[in-house]
Amino acid sequence: MLCSVTQEPGHGGIARVARLVWQVLQEASASPCKLITLIPRGLEPPRPMHKLRFATKVVGELVSRNVDWVIFDHLSLARVQKLVPKAFRRPYAVLLYSIDAWSPLSPGLREILRQARVRIAISNYTAKRVSEAHPEVGSIDVCHLTLLPSQYRIQDTSEERVFSATGPDWSLVKRIQSNSILIVGRMFSTERYKGHDPLIEAWPDLKARVPDAQLVIVGRGDDVPRLKAKAEQTGFGTSILFTGQVSENTLQAIYKQVAVFAMPSRSEGFGLVYLEAMQHRLPCIGSTHDAASEVIEDGVTGFLVDQTDKNSLLDAIAGLLENPSWRRQMGEAGFERLQKEFSFEQFKEKFLTALKPLMSEGIASI
């Protein structure tokens, strides 16, 4: 049984990973898999009624002995274990992303993490941070992420052949200029680490070097008003485009329109958006502070910069915008790296290998 935050588009990387795990389980399992989601549909955050319904379903399935083992695709979901009588508990696995797993945890949540039969981190960096923060929890397997197989197929986003019933928002896409830098990520006041601030702070100096540069910011969150005000204060606010939350189809069209992807984050557990950019042959700029180095090959598929070094970030972006051939070379190298190092089959094999102890224990406990 997979216990998932959501399988619905519009919830960022966590939803993409959830759909990825669900597809692997369906392909690999000889018997039907069960799926229980916290947020079944829509974009609203989980409400008490969602949490109650989720807990009731999970406990009901376990008490009815309908499942052999369980995967929680987010650590917070595993809290439901406290509600399951010990006689009915099944072995379980937990996926570990980033700050949610290496930040201080309550004694109860640490114990839930420790009791997991399998712990899977999405990067070596995440595994290291979790182990340092909570050394008592035990071993952690690492399984680098990939894109869903459908994302590996190049989509045709021309106006004549849109790839869904609705298609991209062309009125928005047409506002994006050729010398654009893209960042994709949530913007919440409690998570100011993605790199929006360093990009905006470097913007006046970048415009001095590349006058036709444009910054495209995709995402939503309660910190957007502050960032918009900060963008206006640069004096170049008209060249900074906040798109808000966009559909998957519109996002894919935006990727095809821009020149460079930049997310100089300092606490990224992996950075699935780097893979999406690489799929579109975009050079990527990440930071030296987190897991970006496991995805971006510095100087080959993009650049890794110190988020606190404005000149380093400025030189990386300006260098790519000023040199189209260099940009194309790095973009091609990134696309090749994606195919070679982050394929769906590689993820599937590593993920299922990590789950073997869970599967064996589940069968033995029946």
Image (cartoon, grey):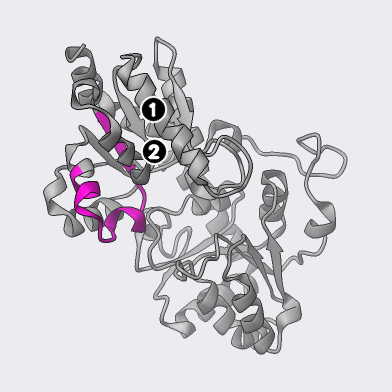
* The N terminus lies in quadrant: top left
Marks 2 and 1, Cα distance to the nearest angstrom? Answer: 14 Å
Residue stretch in magenta: 92-111
The image shows residue 197 at horizontal and vertical percentages of 53, 77
Instruction: Choose top left, top right, bottom left or bottom right for residue 342.
Output: top left
Helix, strand or loop status at disc 2? loop
Q: Position of residue 11 (x, y in %)?
A: 56, 47
Q: Is residue 100 magenta?
A: yes
Please state which of residues 281 and 62 is positioned toward the viewer in this rendering.
62
Q: Residue at x 70, y 89 (%)?
A: 235
Q: Amino acid at mark 2?
A: Asp
Residue corresponding to mark 1? 58
Q: Is residue 285 visible?
A: yes
Dot 2, how many residues are within 10 Å of its Cα: few (below 14), some (14-19), or many (20+)? many
Q: Amino acid at mark 1?
A: Val
Q: Nearer the viewer, mark 2 or mark 1?
A: 1
Which one is in front, 221 or 23?
221
User: Residue at 67% across / 45% down in the picture?
Assistant: 248
